[in-house]
Image: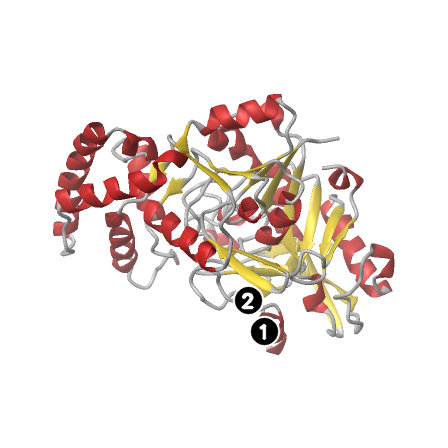
Amino acid sequence: MSERLVVIGSQWGDEGKGKITDYFACRADMVVRYQGGNNAGHSVMFNGHKYSLQSIPSGIFNPNTVNVMGNGMVVNPESVLVELQRLHDQGVTDYQLFISDRAAMVMPWHSALDGAYESLKGGKLIGTTKKGIGPAYCDKYSRSGLRMGDLLEPEYFAERLKAAVEEKNMELAMLGLPTFDFQQVYDRYMEIAAILGPRIVDTSDLINKALISDKKILFEGAQGMMLCIDHGTYPFVTSSTPSSASVPVGAGISPKWIDNVVGVAKAYCTRVGEGPFPTELFDEISHEIRERGHEYGTVTGRPRRVGWFDAVVARYTSRLAGIDNWALMLFDVLSGLDKVRICTHYELDGKIVDTPPSTISKLARCKPVYVELDGWKEDITGVKSFDELPDNAKAYVRKIEELTGVPVGVISVGPDRTQTILISEKLKNF
């Protein structure tokens, strides 16, 4: 029986990780978010209520689950307070939440710089959410950023904040943007420290003690593998690595603990923002899928681009992240279509390729090669087992398994926790 489970997005994000992490969080002793920031949106629905999360782990709804925001994240303290207040307003008041003292902070100037840098690109936008995530990671790696643990030492924080304000004000002034007053920022962050301070701890120590005690731990990624800074559709990517390979560094544990990875994939594909998208649809079917699946960004509200399932991407991300099972999401959205398609390969400049090329210039020239299957008309939102699915729906699942070499371990047939078909014995034992 595996006591550790990693849940990652295997496409371009927005695959339904919130539901899956929430589903398994009910069984987990601890849920750890190991990368990204409040640019990631997770929607969770249960008991007829929808909850939207941005940076807080999906186990927040279970009072018995310890939730950890790991050192690999960039944490916006103001955003955390807003999220907690929103949860409080929705009746979520009993929870355990801890934030790594080593997590980088997203400061108020980061979002201003994010928007300015994006506007300077003219017509070649990256599609950033302008939450300041990229600039915060830049400061982290240039060793000039502030960390959550700094808030616990007021004099040290003041010293580092003063240096940061001086540096960033020069940068903001050059861009013609408003600058920041040190004292105002310092006073506000001391107020934040008074609220969040008790939650800021050495989370690596916390997690490792749980591992040694054989606690059930769920590691939760944000975004998706095709938005990975190293392996995604660069430069139309995020500023961190959502892969399961990032868990050890982003959570502060040894790689030996990672042994069970679920790749969350929609039964079709979507992406928000710019960049090549080989299976993208521009017809009435795309509109139909978008409306049925409510394909609008959790954080931005932007309509998502829609395409057929891409087995080229699935094979690629499975190889990179060591995916053991697929969690196939929004499967019910495809019900009612006469035909469904799966991309098996790409055609690039007259040649067949079976892995995404490294440059967007080549990826933009890739034409999808499809296999077409018969659709199904039946309503599957109440189905409780794989055997109850229509034959054509079963055939679609089996074709994905055949093309990717990875079994489907979970199928979601609706947004609620109860609308989940659990197939994998390994996952049943988590």
Q: Name the residue under label 1.
A: 291
Residue 411 lies, in percent from the top left, at 73, 54
Residue 312, label in figure = none
Cα separation, mark 1 vs mark 2, equals: 7 Å
Residue 97 seen: yes
Residue 142 seen: no
Residue 295, label in figure = 2
Amino acid type at image mark 2: Glu
Label 1: state its secondary structure: helix
Residue toward you, 214 or 396: 214
Image-quadrant location for residue 301: bottom left
Compared across the picture, whether 81 is left or right of 120 comes to right
Taking the spot 51% from the left edge, 34% from the top edge, the residue there is 246
Label 1: how many Cα within 10 Å (few below 14, some 14–19, many 20+): few
Residue 306 lies, in percent from the top left, at 57, 66
The C terminus - image quarter: top right
Amino acid type at image mark 1: Glu
Residue 343 lies, in percent from the top left, at 67, 58
Question: Where 246 falls versus 397 (above or below)?
Answer: above
Compared across the picture, whether 5 is left or right of 42 comes to right
Label 2: how many Cα within 10 Å (few below 14, some 14–19, many 20+): many
Residue toward you, 398 or 344: 398
Taking the spot 79% from the left edge, 70% from the top edge, the residue there is 376
**Label pair 1/2, CB-CB below 8 angstroms:** yes
Residue 409 lies, in percent from the top left, at 75, 46
Compared across the picture, whether 369 is left or right of 201 comes to right
Taking the spot 58% from the left edge, 63% from the top edge, the residue there is 49
Residue toward you, 411 or 420: 420
Label 2: state its secondary structure: loop
